[in-house]
Image (cartoon, helix red, strand yellow):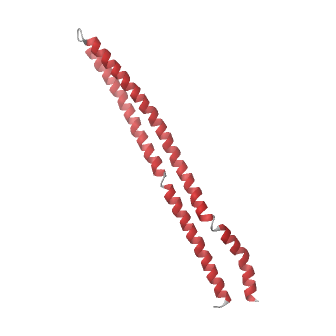
Amino acid sequence: MPPLSRIRVVDASVALWVVLWLLAGAYVFVAVGQLQDYGDTTITAAAGLHQTSRALGRAADGLRDTGDALEQIPFVGGEIESNIGRTAGDVDRLGNSVRVTARQARASGVQARESAHDVAIVLGAAVALVPTVPVIALYLLLRPVVIERVRR
C-alpha cells in the first residue's frame, strides 16, 4: 500500500473514532435527558395534589354549612353541628397538609427536571469529548510531520 494511502486509512480511522464517540455522547445525552420525565411526572402529581387540597377545602366548607343547617334541630342539633365542625376542621387541616405537599412536590419536580437536563449535557459532552479531543489534538500535531516524512 502506498504511503499516502496509509495516511488516508489513518484519516478515515480517526474520523470514524470521532464520529462513534460523538454518537455515543449524543446517546448518553438523550438517555440521561429522559430522567426529566420523572420531574415532569412529579410536577403532574403535584398539580393533582393541589386540586385535591382545593376539593378538601370545599368539602370542609360544605360540612360547616351542613352543620349550621343541622344546628336548628331541637335537642341534638348543637351536638351534631359540633361533631360536623370538628370533622370540617380535620378536613381543613388535611387539605392544608396536602397543599404544602403539593408545593414541595412541584418544587422537587422542577428541580429534578432542571438537574436532569444539566447532568445530561455534562455527561453527554464528557462521553463525546474526553476520548476524542486528545486523539484529534495528537492527530493534528503529528499528521503534518508524517506527511512530510512520507513525501521525502
Above or below for 82 versus 32: above
Q: Is residue 148 left or right of residue 79?
A: right
Hey, which quadrant is residue 72 in on the image?
Answer: top left
**In the picture, which quadrant includes the N terminus?**
bottom right
Tell me how many marks there are: 0
Q: Left or right? Give the position of 122 relative to 72.
A: right
The image quarter in which residue 135 lies? bottom right
Q: Position of residue 2 (x, y in %)?
A: 66, 91
Q: Is residue 96 left or right of residue 27?
A: left
Q: Pinpoint residue 129: horizontal percent, then vertical percent.
A: 62, 64
Residue in the picture at 58% in, 63% down: 127
16 relative to 126, above or below: below
Identify the residue at horizontal 73%, vertical 87% (top origin). 150
Q: Residue at x 61, y 61 (%)?
A: 126
Q: Residue at x 42, y 44 (%)?
A: 44
Q: Position of residue 87 (x, y in %)?
A: 33, 22
Towards the viewer: 28 or 52: 28
Q: Residue furthest left?
A: 74
Pinpoint residue 27: horizontal percent, then vertical percent: 51, 63
Q: Is residue 63 left or right of residue 117?
A: left
Q: Quadrant of the C terminus?
A: bottom right
Instruction: Give the residue furthest to the bottom.
Output: 1
